[in-house]
Image (tube, rainbow, N blue to C red):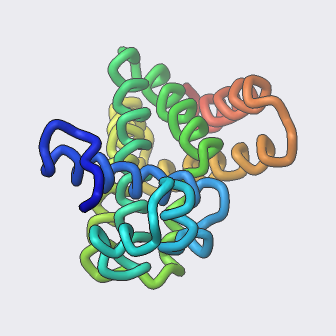
Amino acid sequence: MPRIDAPTVAEHSAQRRAAIVDAAVDLLGREGIAGVTPAAVASAAGLARSSVYQYFSSTDALVAAGVEEAFRRTRVLVDRGQARATTPAERVAAWVDSALDAAVAGHEPMSAYAAADLPDACRAAVAELHHGLAAPLVAALEEHGVSSPGPVAELVAGVVVAAAAQVARGQAVRTVRRRTRAFVLAAIHL
């Protein structure tokens, strides 16, 4: 009989599932989708490989859960940044900061997940989550009077991806953040 590490079996199960998803998100950030295997996730979570299959029927399902959770965590960062901002310029800067923080932490751009063999339901969820991440930026750009705020938001997101690459090559996050924010605000005349 396995040892239960929580007051109830349901809580124990929820804790194990959360540990598995946390490990999947961590591996996504460090190794990309190819690094998210049941064996690697089990090892990172401190569980037996068979335990992963109790919660996820396949590698695809495991990757899907990790990808969706990564997007949810990024959304939390974006929402926190937006809560402190009051003007369109502040909201754009907060979005850039939050998106950069998420990218540095390993959140891949949508294009990285597009190549993955994700289940259709996960693809739909990721597309919706991606749209939700961009929505505050699009709204701030629209409020500022930027024509075509959706395409401009895509360009801003591309700048953040490039900024994260600079950090990955060893440049200081603070310097890259300042430079990226200044570049984006100047480019959209904020």
Q: Residue at x 42, y 37 (%)?
A: 141
Residue 78 position within the rendered picture, expressed as x and y whole percent measured from the top left: 41, 34
Q: Residue at x 60, y 29 (%)?
A: 185
Residue 124 position within the rendered picture, expressed as x and y whole percent measured from the top left: 28, 72
Q: Residue at x 55, y 52 (%)?
A: 26
**In the current view of this chain or complex, which residue is farthest to the right?**
170
Q: Nearer the viewer, residue 132 or 53?
A: 53
Which quarter of the picture shows residue 21?
A: bottom left
Residue 182 position within the rendered picture, expressed as x and y whole percent measured from the top left: 69, 27
Figure check: 37 above or below 160: below
Q: Is residue 123 visible?
A: no
Q: Residue at x 55, y 56 (%)?
A: 44
Relative to residue 80, is residue 156 drawn left or right? right
Q: Quadrant of the N terminus?
A: bottom left
Q: Quadrant of the C terminus?
A: top right
Q: Nearer the viewer, residue 60 or 168?
A: 60
Q: Nearer the viewer, residue 28 or 94?
A: 28
Figure check: 58 above or below 96: below
* Numbered circles on residues, count: 0
Q: Is residue 151 visible?
A: yes
Figure check: 90 above or below 67: above
Relative to residue 143, is residue 63 drawn left or right? right
Residue 49 position within the rendered picture, expressed as x and y whole percent measured from the top left: 46, 72
